[in-house]
Image (tube, grey):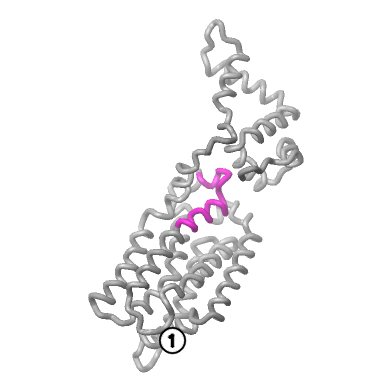
Amino acid sequence: MTGWHAPETLIARYADGSLPDADAWSLEKHLESCASCAGRVSGAVRATAAGAVLADVRDAVLAAATPAPAEATPQDLRDAVLAAATPAPAGAPPPRTPRLLWAAAPAVRGAWLPAVLLVALGAVLLAHVAGFSGARTLLLAVAPVVPVAGVALSYGRHADPLHELAASTPSAGLRLVLTRTAVVLAVSLPLLTLAGLVLPSPGGPGAAAWLLPGLTLTLAALALGGWLGLRTATAVTGGGWLCAVLAPALATPDGAVARHLSDQLSAYVGGAATQGGWAAAAALCAVLLAARRTAYDRLERF
């Protein structure tokens, strides 16, 4: 939002109550760090029919809540309150760190983060302690589902005790989901990729071959969440991937599960053409998510 200011038409629609909720929330979020727009919006609201009512209410609240000194007038109190509530100057950096930590907290607490570490460490122990040659293959099969599970465990009543409060803020809905998804990806992608790099490779896909499939599955879960809800959507996408990769390998009659699993992964994530297909699918899921972004404004679905 740096350098951007709300146009007069947007402010006028906000003041008269005709602006859609999503746009109104976006404007209110911008006002937290833009003193210029905050002053313009305040002036526009005061110019409407509600302005006089709001002024009377404010005067009544100030008079009832603040014991005025003998020499102070209601105007003095009003000016003091407005000065204290004025946003920081445009050049001052807003206090974003506490808000970012609050928004991202459910994505890095609870059982999910230990689960990511367990998957990465378990694969390393299987390879270097137990001598299991298919550890990297198994890790690549499971890794795309890890961020999907992290998204399911980072948003909703089941994940956040303050969910109802968070969902009522201007930053709620898809913006909050994407913030927590970014934290999930920022933690899981480097950890699992690093674990894959230190594992012996018997051939097959490289340690980073799962990144595009994992991103695509995450975006697909978010896009489906607009229709099914996040938990159901993540179960569908994550469960579908595991069934597609593991079921054929486990059903092989010769018992060579590791070899067949490696062949399955090579078919699903190996090669430039396959990775290009995953990239196209990720772009399509992002478009669908953008088209369904308003579905995340409905608290009861999630």
What secondary structure is found at the residue carrying circle 1?
helix
Horizontal side of residue 109 vs 79, given as left or right? left
Q: Main secondary structure of the magenta part?
A: helix
Residue depicted at x 45% and y 64%: 147
Q: Nearer the viewer, residue 96 or 264?
A: 96
Residue 184 x, y percent position in the rendering: 45, 59
Residue 33 x, y percent position in the rendering: 58, 38
Q: Quadrant of residue 47?
A: top right
Residue depicted at x 75% and y 30%: 48
In the image as oriented, which residue stretches furthest toward the bottom?
Answer: 254
Residue depicted at x 66% and y 30%: 39
Q: Nearer the viewer, residue 20 or 142?
A: 142
In the image as oriented, which residue stretches furthest toward the front?
Answer: 91
- The answer to if 50 sits in the magenta stretch is no
- The answer to if 173 sits in the magenta stretch is yes
Residue 3 x, y percent position in the rendering: 64, 42
Horizontal side of residue 249 vs 267, given as left or right? left
Q: Callout 1 environment at 10 Å: few (<14), some (14 to 19), or many (20+)?
A: some
Q: Quadrant of residue 229?
A: bottom right
Residue 102 x, y percent position in the rendering: 45, 45
Q: Which residue is mark 1?
A: 263
How many tags in the picture?
A: 1
Q: Is residue 215 above or below residue 135?
A: above
Horizontal side of residue 280 vs 261, given as left or right? right
* Quadrant assignment for the N terminus: top right
Q: Amino acid at mark 1?
A: Asp
Residue depicted at x 67% and y 22%: 55
Q: Which residues are magenta?
A: 166-183
In the image as oriented, which residue stretches furthest toward the top?
Answer: 70
